[in-house]
Image (cartoon, coloured by chain):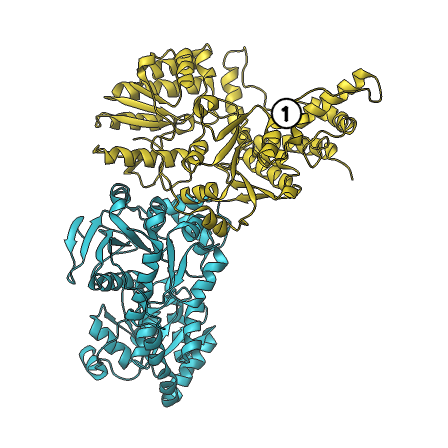
Amino acid sequence: MVTPYAPLRDGIAAYAVQQVGALRAEGHDVEVLSNGPSAAHHHLDLTGLRGIGALAKRVRAYDKVIIQFHPDLFYPHPTTPDKHAAVSAALLAMAKASRHLEIVVHEIDYRLGQRKGLDAFAAKAFWRQVNTIVLHTAAERDDFVTSFGVKPERISLVAHGASFVKRTRADRATARRTLGIAPEAFVFLSIGFIQPHKGFDRAVRAFNGLAEHGCELHIVGSIRVDDPDFASYLGELEGLIETTNGAYLHSGYVSDELFDRWIVAADVVVLPYRNIWSSGVLERAMLYDRRVLLTAVGALAHQVGDRPLVTMVGGDAELMAAMRALIGQSDGDEFVSSPWELGDGDGPLRSRVQDELVARAQIRRGGRSAVSERGALVDRTAAASASRRSAALRRLPPLAPPPAVSGRRGASTFKRLVRRATAWEVDPVIHQVNALRDAVVQAIEEPRP
Amino acid sequence: MTDAQPPVVREGRIGLVPARFGDGMVGGAEIVLHQMAKRLQDRGWDVEILTTTAMNHHTWESELPAGESVSDDGLKVTRFPAVFQQTVERQTLEAAIMAGHPVSIADQQRWINSGMRSPELFHHLLDHGDDYRALIFTPYPSWIAYACSQLLPERSVLWTCLHDEPYAYLELFQPVFTGVAGLLLQTEPEHELAHRVAELGPHALVGCGVEIPQSYDPEGFRKRYGIEGRFLLYAGRREGAKGWEQLLDQLGRATERRDLPFTLVTMGGGDINAPEWFKDKVIDVGFLPDDERDNAFAAADAYIQPSKFEAFSRTVMEAWLAGTLVIANGGSEVVADHCARSGAGLVYEDELELEEALVFLAEAPEAAAEVAANGRAYVLDNYRWEVVLDKVEDALVRWTAV
């Protein structure tokens, strides 16, 4: 099995240990190769052509090779279409060298297969060479077939939590005691790596005002890789939590056991993902029969199926309403269910509509001036006013380096080299500019005392 | 009314998992685990030692065959290959951690995974973890304790050996301190430290068992090893982390300044590396059998404990059992606490305090012996194996299930 592996705080590593355990229990002789020193029998830097080449030399020695696939395992970051195509071609060669290759897909970008170009061609060729592709839902299978042209019979569906086992024996009372949570509190939990696409900030915003009803929101996790964007997001989250009564951030290392203990201690697990392929946290929450609120993105709807303890929401407003409904405070619904209650208020209708839509937009992007402590939209005029103040800034798109492309022969390569050589100096500046922009927008839109 | 406890039902296998195991090994925690295993087996438990093929904790070279064997004292031992390759990255990270620099969690993971590992032991527990009622690991910063206790937290008990050292504050170990079945702690200072570094899960202060020698032969020891005159004793690993090199420097200078009458006798492992001008004053007797070790303690004028990182310090107890004064580095809260509570040890915070303690010993041997005499009763009252094992068994039964 080729995979990130324990002891490592990584969802795929935890998944892999459980699958290795299950396979060995069935009597298979399993050896593990990880992408760094670990409890695996072997380790190898798998990134890029050299790593995949080294892997290709080894795979023939095994009757079956199982790869726990995440693009970061093989594809360098950042990458280019040409580089991507080269890595896919190397993976194709590795697949051809394997006697039987099975790939468990943890994340993939389907858009790649739908593009035209060498990178898409190479990716399709690689995936078509794989003997068995393991996905979790029928919808994923359909998307995979459409995007990469893989024969459906090569795709095997395995429930995401099929190999999951409980990692803690703590009961709710013990879990709460050891985590310092009051027995009577109603606890919302958002747990996992702290990254913008996990959307934990949405949970904090939706939670605003629930502390007065005896609720707590705990955000638990850590930054997966040292990335300035992730660090910036963490800072943003810290700022948000500081101003949100009853919300707490536990930023730090979370072991498998501690991860499960948090779930046991929680009443509701909130997963407000902006985008994600599938959710291991959802499966772990199901192990302990915990209620889950999650956003309907990626293939989550298919993963959820008809499980009764899971509520899917479409966006921030619905998330807010669902959280309130769970504690019997559903009066935020007037806002969530979206009737445009414009009434006869002051000013022309158009202005009121305009204010309303601006306010709603502000909330969708995370603004707070329009929302009361109970989550209701209260002051459309103020919200619109705040949004107007920040409009000029928001019109500026986020700063990004210019694409390293050119119609002149050789110029693209030269630009890429320059880009690579200066990235260490330029990227932090870009990051800082964007963070400043976001901070200024937020500051302008904050409600004024 | 009676306080009698219900009899312990000794069901299920106990796996004790030291990183090293075998004769001639220097290492307090590993030796204690060996003694505990033997005594738990004698009390009727099904006991197995799970360890590596290595004996040297610097090189982690495989010296013994992998597989099952039986130790001289009748313990079932299963050994797994140790994997270790010293890398520049590890040395860099180790230096950063020891200097107290902030180290990201990703780097902490790289650090622990760049130390000695045993993938085969890990997978043995992945395959057969259910065969064990409890697994007792030590010490907490070893890869084996870290990785395997996270694999089977509900069965994992830590013979913690927590010191007030940079490792203890690494975020990496928080789940170990908070999430395993239980922590066994040896002293009140260790207990207090544990509460300072983590929101503890189940834990128990059980002490640490010490063997009680039947008799001593100090004169015979002197004769057999050719030792004349008064001497100080150091027993243990001779390495920087134990304060060995600093002790040599301080002792050398103090001896020169005050014309002290002591030689330094040392037993255990590691290079001596004494300064040229002090070499003649250092006598290495190597590894000693248990009875000669006890005789050495009885023959010494004082036992020196220079380490700041002690979770219990078994050697201090052995000195006190032999009626010998202890002079210890006060930087170790644990040993300072022992010295204060027993009334049988002196502590020093710097070179000059060490020097004065030695002058006291040189000039007032009767008074020094009177101080030291308090030590034996302290050990017998608190650290007999019978007392400790009762507490260990109680904790195992409460924390784990068959």
Q: Which chain is cyan?
A: B
The shade of chain A is yellow
**Counting other residues with Cα less than 10 Å from the Cα at mark 1, is it few (<14), some (14-19), or many (20 or more)?**
few
Q: Position of residue A186 (x, y in %)?
A: 56, 42
Image mark 1: chain: A
Q: Quadrant of the N terminus of chain B?
A: bottom left
Residue furthest to the right in view is A347
Disc 1 secondary structure class: loop
- Three-letter amino acid code at the position of disc 1: Pro
Horizontal side, residue A359 vs residue B389: left or right: right
In this view, A144 is above or below B92: above
Q: Is residue A285 visible?
A: yes
Front residue of B68 and A51: B68
**Which residue is rendered at x = 26% and y = 59% of the image?**
B9
Residue that numbered label 1 is attached to? A398
Q: Position of residue B171 (x, y in %)?
A: 47, 49
In this view, B228 is above or below A340: below
